[in-house]
Amino acid sequence: MSYLLAKLTGSSLRIKVATWPESGRFQPVCNSKKRKAVGCIALAVLLWGCGSEQSIQQTDPGPDTNSASPVAESTAIPEPESAATEPVAVNDSLSLEPTLDAAPPSFTGADSEESVDDILAELNAIKLEGEGDNPLSDPDKVVALMNEGNALISNGKADAALAKYNEALKFAENGEDPEVFFNRGIAYKAKGEIEKAAAEYERALEVTPKYAEALNNLGNIRKDQKQYDEAIRCLELSIEVFPDNPNTYNNLGTVFAMKGNVNKAAVYFTKAVRLQPSYIDARQNLGLAYQQQGRLDVAEKEFGEALQMTMGMKLREEKRLEAARVMVDQAKKPGSPLTFEQRNNAGGELDAAEQASRMANAKYQRSLKLFQTVRARR
């Protein structure tokens, strides 16, 4: 996804991949799940008492909800920084479709007939979902709480987001949901509680072993802990599940570079760039790998491409920042032409534009430095 982009770093993705964000920020995920509710038994009791044969099947499918997706975290060379991308959500289609077959036995005389009391006793012996220690799951509630948590973590409120995710688990089927665990891992990572983050990714993988984004993020944690073999295992498994995620190839290349295998690192950086030509971090990493191999001409080419991209990004973010400042000025004036919503959002847009402008400028300055360095060495 989300949930940052410097030197040989590993970033840990909510989410849906058509294109991959250059920032490498990971974001929490939230998928809809189509589920069905338990059928009503009252009519079965009535029909059974009347001696008729009926099969009751009442379902109430919940609405589909699109997730905000996450993505796997990505890495840049060489200084490690926490980063994340828009993850791909796992779509689980769950259903709960009980059927009560109310077919009475064939009665041949008074001695074989069941009394109403006998029928009620049998029905009372059935433990229905939602009774006692078996609470009824509510997928819509899970989705709503996850969305609230995602909004909070996007605003840097990891503790508040965790509270929402924890509440969501109360409404999850059997108290387990791999996406909730995944998002909790992202929240703990944002808090700097790395071991707790790893434990949450592992819980997600226990429920869904082929959870590509959880494998990617767990691999990045193991890389940061210098557990390189375990990091490689996780990242390679992630690629097996989702072979088109450029972030994972970039991360795997970073691990091999940290192990000193520059040739293999270059192979994975190249794959990341082929999947996403606008992937600035991967281009810079590939350029550094070429530079270490002594291939200064192709290194300069990669750094030059990254420089052009970051220059365009810097200019775009500067225009966005200027527009945000104008909006704030208009919002402060009496009789402002802005709508009420625009005035309320002006301050938040300015903060976001300032942060994006700083990040874009940092990327540009790094690209410029790398380009100038390799050109001076030729």
Image (cartoon, grey):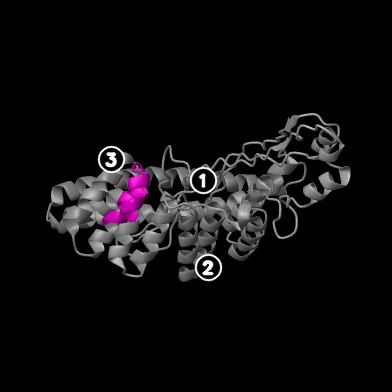
Q: Does the magenta run of residues contain 180?
A: no
Q: Amino acid at mark 2?
A: Lys
Q: Is 102 displayed left or right of 149 in the figure?
A: right
Query: Residue 23, can we see it?
Result: no
Q: Residues within 10 Å of mark 1 (few under 14, many from 20)?
A: many
Q: Is residue 9 above or below residue 246?
A: below
Which residue matches tag 2? 191
Q: Is 121 displayed left or right of 220 in the figure?
A: right
Q: Is 366 displayed left or right of 286 in the figure?
A: right
Give yes or no for contact between labels 1 and 3 (Cβ–Cβ under 8 Å): no
Question: Image point 69% across, 37% down: which residue?
Answer: 99
- Where is residue 308? Give x, y as percent: 32, 43
**Marker disc for residue 69:** 1
**3D distance between C-alphas at marks 2 and 3:** 34 Å
User: Could you tell me what secondary structure mostly forms the magenta stretch?
Assistant: helix
Which residue matches tag 3? 274
Question: Image point 63% across, 61% down: which residue?
Answer: 166
Nearer-N-terminus badge (2/3): 2
Give yes or no for contact between labels 2 and 3 (Cβ–Cβ under 8 Å): no
